[in-house]
């Protein structure tokens, strides 16, 4: 089950970064990226047949590079960077939920919020899935937490 | 034929992404207008000639669905090509939009996918020809 969730999370994340931010996975950079500084994390909550949270953590200046490229701003503001990472988390969440729950369900995704590295939430629950993706401009870690499933 | 496009989304970032993807799609673009919610979108429609609207669903003040309902009720805009650009995944909700003559593009989307949907909504094949069949007189049986 976790393997399936992980696979679907990975596919949703890759598609989102490629189509929205024009960023591609760079597997050869995985070793270099292991010690990159944490820029911050965008988070969305979702409710529906399954409920939980999706976190997208940016490392190594990814969110700044992404905002500069996508928004065409030489020096994007922190607000722009956080906004973009939030939109990325929103889209990944919207993409992965029908993949894991089926397309006939109604989900409600909350507005994104941003967590600075110092505000990182300590989740007591184990993540349902987590993927780490080295990209051409830093790295990203996407974590899916499922807190509730509705009985059929 | 350059398209005047209205992009309605409560996220300024997402509006920029949509506009960037539009510019990469190869579609002929004229004036591009932006709105942060349905109310602003309707004001822009009232004051400008718009050929196509790209609309998010979940917005504050007025949702995309409410805005589309108002567009369809107004004789001036009833036939405006509208495409919802959203993370929405409910097939029932998407079918309701389709019943209202609205196209749908799921985020994330490629420039090619956006182009394909826009062309199908405005009734143009990708080779630039109309998708409406031309009836030759010889086809008719009087």
Image (spheres, coloured by chain):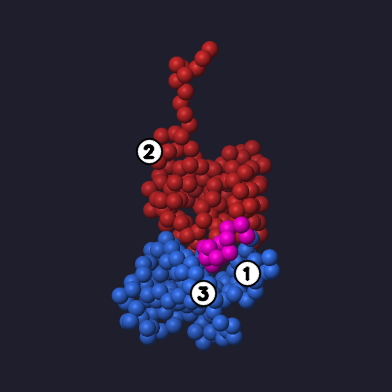
Chain colours: A blue, B red
* Location of residue A12 in the rendering, given as x and y in whole percent from the top left corner: 47, 65
Secondary element type, mark 3: helix
Residue drawn at the location 50% of the way across and 59% of the way down: B107
Residue wearing tag 3: A2
Q: Residues within 10 Å of mark 2 (few under 14, many from 20)?
A: few
For disc 1, the marked residue is A50
Q: Which image quadrant is residue B36 in?
A: bottom right
Which range of residues does the magenta coloring cover?
A93-105
Q: Chain of mark 1?
A: A
Residue at image point 63% right, 48% down? B96
The residue furthest right is A151
Closer to us: A135 or B21: A135
Residue that badge 2 annotates: B127
Magenta-span inclusion, residue B13: no
- The tag earlier along the polypeptide, 1 or 3, is 3
- Total labels: the figure holds 3
């Amino acid at each position: 089950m976790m393997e399936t969730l992980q696979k679907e999370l990975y596919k949703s994340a890759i598609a989102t970064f490629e189509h929205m931010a024009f960023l591609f996975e760079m597997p050869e950079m995985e070793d270099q990226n292991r010690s990159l500084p944490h820029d911050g994390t965008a988070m969305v909550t979702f409710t529906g047949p399954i409920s939980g949270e999706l976190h997208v953590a940016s490392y190594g200046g990814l969110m700044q590079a992404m905002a500069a490229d996508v928004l065409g701003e030489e020096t994007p503001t922190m607000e722009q960077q956080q906004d973009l990472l939030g939109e990325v988390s929103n889209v990944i969440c919207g993409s992965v939920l029908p993949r894991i729950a089926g397309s006939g369900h109604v989900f409600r995704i909350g507005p994104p919020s941003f967590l600075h590295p110092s505000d990182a939430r300590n989740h007591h629950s184990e993540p349902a899935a987590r993927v780490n993706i080295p990209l051409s401009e830093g790295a990203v870690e996407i974590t899916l937490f499922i807190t509730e499933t509705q009985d059929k | 034929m350059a398209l005047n496009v209205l992009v309605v989304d409560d996220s300024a970032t997402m509006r920029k992404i949509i506009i960037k993807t539009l510019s990469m799609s190869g579609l002929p673009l004229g004036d591009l207008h932006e709105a942060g919610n349905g109310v602003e979108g309707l004001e822009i429609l009232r004051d400008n000639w718009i050929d196509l609207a790209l609309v998010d669903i979940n917005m504050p003040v007025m949702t995309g669905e409410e805005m589309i309902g108002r567009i369809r009720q107004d004789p001036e805009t009833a036939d405006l090509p509208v495409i919802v650009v959203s993370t929405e995944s409910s097939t029932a909700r998407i079918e309701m939009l389709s019943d209202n003559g609205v196209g749908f593009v799921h985020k994330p989307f490629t420039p090619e996918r956006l182009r394909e949907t826009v062309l199908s909504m405005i009734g143009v094949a990708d080779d630039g020809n109309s998708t409406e069949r031309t009836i030759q007189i010889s086809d008719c049986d009087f």
